[in-house]
Image: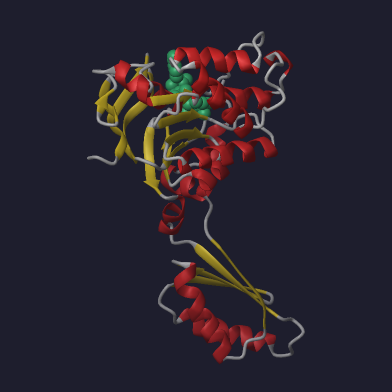
Amino acid sequence: MPNVMVWVDRLEKSYGSIIALDSISFSVAAGRIFGLLGPNGAGKTTAIKILTTLARPDAGTAEIAGIDVLRDPVKVRGLIGYVPQELTVDPYLTAREHLRYYGDLYHLSATLREARMRELLSLVGLIGHEDRRVRTFSGGMKKKLDLACGLLHRPPLILLDEPSLGLDVRGRHDVWSYILHLKDQGATVLLCTNYMDEAERLCDEVAIIDRGRIAAIGTPAALKSELKRDVISVELSASNDHHGEKLAALEQAVSKLGMVRAIAKDGTQLKIYVESNEMALPQILQSAAALTVPIQAITYSRPSLDEVFLHHTGHSFAERNEPRG
Ligand SMILES: Nc1ncnc2c1ncn2[C@@H]1O[C@H](COP(=O)(O)OP(=O)(O)OP(=O)(O)O)[C@@H](O)[C@H]1O
Ligand SMILES: [Mg+2]
């Protein structure tokens, strides 16, 4: 398959009695951003470590661009850029010294190295800080330098383990636009994340992982719409004398529509539970117009990825994310 950058088939890994990966399978098409979304201890880092050839699976297969990670680890390493979850920067080196060091590790010529260094420092917002020692950097600056170091050689596949961990809102947005920029440049990105909003904002496709198993895979939009739990709320104007009757009439008309699953009346509001907002909204508006219902506002919402997680795993993300003693 020419367009597959990452192919993982029934990977298993245990540490003593702890099953970190319990037969996971997924694939990532070239040029996409794929997210492993799961709570603490789900097995995300373990999966990434196998793909980066830093850990051996107990069973299963993993390939990067068709190359088996166990059979040809050296070739695989040449195709990937990896930024681990823990910071790897050295407090006593400057940003420039880090990038020069990595440039040498990747065998870049001095000219290429200097050019890429300037580009990366500007992309991650560290221009002007090149010659400061990293111990004087904030946590966010260290993370951004780490990201730059892992990508100096422009690998086709980038593996990012919790890329925005510990960053403030501004820093997260910087990192997100940087990741989107990498995709624009043609890279494939596999990232692990603990954050629903990060998965939602960045990922073309998400695998929800929990206790070493993949519970669901799909685009964030598909995962949410599969639950068929969209809600449309119609708010009537309370100043209209007939709002009570109109609300009852609308409720009756809407209850006859095919895609409506349930309806709840609450004061001047009708909450309509439907399989899909897109499908139901025009018909609900049509019914309201035919009945001259005095509408003040209409809002609609989709379930969150949190609800997707709950649906597929039987427990909430937050509950699983609690530190375990
Ligand atoms: N070297 C190791 N020795 C023993 N157990 C390990 C080791 N590495 C991971 N584990 C265990 O394997 C399981 C999966 O860990 P992993 O680091 O892959 O989770 P994660 O999804 O990356 O979690 P987090 O969001 O906290 O980074 C956990 O129960 C963890 O304790
Ligand atoms: Mg991890």
Q: Is residue 4 above or below residue 96?
A: below
x, y percentage for residue 263? 53, 72
Quick one: which residue is furthest to the right in this view?
239
Quick one: which residue is furthest to the top in this view?
92
Between residue 233 and residue 145, name the one nearer to us. Answer: 145
The residue drawn where x is 51% and y is 35% is 193
The residue drawn where x is 60% and y is 27% is 118
Residue 87 position by quadrant? top right
Quick one: which residue is furthest to the front in this view?
111
Q: Is residue 36 left or right of residue 292?
A: left
Between residue 182 and residue 63, name the one nearer to us. Answer: 182
Q: Which color scheme does this rendered protein use?
A: secondary structure
x, y percentage for residue 90? 61, 11
x, y percentage for residue 273? 51, 68
Residue 294 position by quadrant? bottom right
x, y percentage for residue 315? 49, 41
Q: Is residue 55 above or below residue 175?
A: above
Q: Quadrant of the C terminus?
A: top right
The residue drawn where x is 24% and y is 40% is 2
Q: Is residue 221 above or below residue 165?
A: below
Q: Is residue 166 visible?
A: yes
Residue 10 position by quadrant? top left
Q: Is residue 216 left or right of residue 295?
A: left
The residue drawn where x is 32% and y is 22% is 76
Q: Is residue 88 visible?
A: no
Q: Quadrant of the N terminus?
A: top left
Q: Is residue 185 left or right of residue 290?
A: left
Q: Is residue 94 above or below residue 311?
A: above
